[in-house]
Image (cartoon, grey):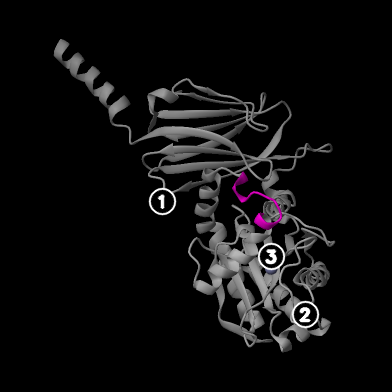
Amino acid sequence: MRLLKGLLFLWFCLTGTFCLAQTVQDIRLSGTPADGVRFVAELDKEADVSLSKLNNPPRLVIDFKGTRFDNQLLQKKWPAVGFVHTCRTGTPKPQTARVVLDFPENCQWQEKHFSLPPQSAKNWRFVVDLNRTKTKTTTNATPSTKAETNKQKIIVLDPGHGGQDPGAVSRTGRYEKDLVLMMAKETKKLLEKAGYKVVLTRSKDIFIPLRGRIKKAHEANGDLFISIHADRAKNSSAKGLSIYTISEKASDKEAAALAERENKADILYGMDLAEYQQEVSDILIDLAKTDAMNKSSQYADNVVDEMKKKIRLVPNAHRFAGFVVLKSPNIPSVLLEMGYLSNREEEKQMWQKSYRNKLSQALVNAVNQFFKENP
Ligand SMILES: [Zn+2]
């Protein structure tokens, strides 16, 4: 009998601790460019995770099932980051690793969560992005999910450059920054006519750093981000429209050089691209690879389909490069190069309202198609 008890005890110990599938090895909290908070848990394997939102006091409970904490994380507390007051760990059941995030009283927030498979880092990462929402003064009775699905889609248009950064200069001395601002304002009108809400990252001739553009897109709660540019080339016969989505590896040398030119705005004008920790930018790139990247590509392909009915495109018009401005973690983002300012004919066309109208209309058609496919 004593032996049986002993064996049973041993069995409980084994199933309760050693047989757990995975371990939470690290937990980090950091601020995001959109004034939100990012929670990252590193695990040696992918875990089944459940989240529950609780009130009084407001908190978010994250349960990693069949998971244990690395010893150094047990009963640990993390200091406040942004609007997250505390982050603490516990083990409510022997096979559940629980993390609780505490928020201030009456705080309302939205969260998005996802798992990232090991890439440059060796661990799985479970990420929760938290953004504080405005406290509703009227009624809190409407479930946020319903409001979400019925809400008007928000398009963020980002005219490139501005202020002391003219962008590319045309053969006749005209500036990219002026062209793309006109184009953005005209596209805004057409999108609004089609029922969208439109936010411009700039509506005047001012300089905005690249990260500031991403921040604006997040503050606006954008569903789609379109950055508008025009290119130049040494070869004056180069012409045609192209559209880019993000990739760590550029699709060709030309694309890499273009991204370098466009990214330069911040370096040239005194902003530090490395203001965000390396880790955050790694995650941004990882994320861009997943859902938002698929959707960005989908929209870019829609644009190519619409544009080719109307105007001349460069060969393989949907291209890839590492544009800083496309690194929003959750918003599908594309960058449009309307054409080449170094080409005499194309420069003339781009300064014609009727030509820009064709491009704008194609962008709107592609937006319609995109939201038909992603309601
Ligand atoms: Zn540009």
Q: Position of residue 343 (x, y in %)?
A: 69, 85
Q: Is residue 85 visible?
A: yes
Tell me whether circle 1 and circle 2 mark residues in contact (CB < 8 Å). Answer: no
Q: In the displayed structure, does residue 229 sit left or right of residue 173? A: left
Q: Is residue 229 above or below residue 147?
A: below
Q: Position of residue 199 (x, y in %)?
A: 78, 59
- Amino acid type, label 1: Gln
Q: Label 1: how many residues lie within 10 Å, few (<14), some (14-19) or many (20+)?
A: few
Give the quarter of the figure containing the N terminus. top left
Q: Which corner quadrant of the figure contains ligand 1?
A: bottom right
- Amino acid type, label 3: Ile
Earlier in the chain: of badge 1 and badge 3, it is 1
Helix, strand or loop for disc 2: helix
**Which residue is at the front of the view, 90 or 320?**
320
Q: Label 2: how many residues lie within 10 Å, few (<14), some (14-19) or many (20+)?
A: many
Residue range (magenta):
267-275
- Amino acid type, label 2: Arg
Q: Position of residue 82 (x, y in %)?
A: 66, 33
- When asked about the image quadrant of residue 22, the answer is top left
**Which residue is at the front of the view, 71 or 147?**
71
The residue tagged 2 is 356
Give the quarter of the figure containing the C terminus. bottom right
The residue tagged 3 is 226
Mark 1 to mark 2: distance in Å?
Answer: 41 Å
Q: Position of residue 281 (x, y in %)?
A: 55, 49
* 303 within the magenta span: no
The residue tagged 1 is 119
Earlier in the chain: of badge 3 and badge 2, it is 3
Mark 1 to mark 3: distance in Å?
Answer: 28 Å
* 273 within the magenta span: yes
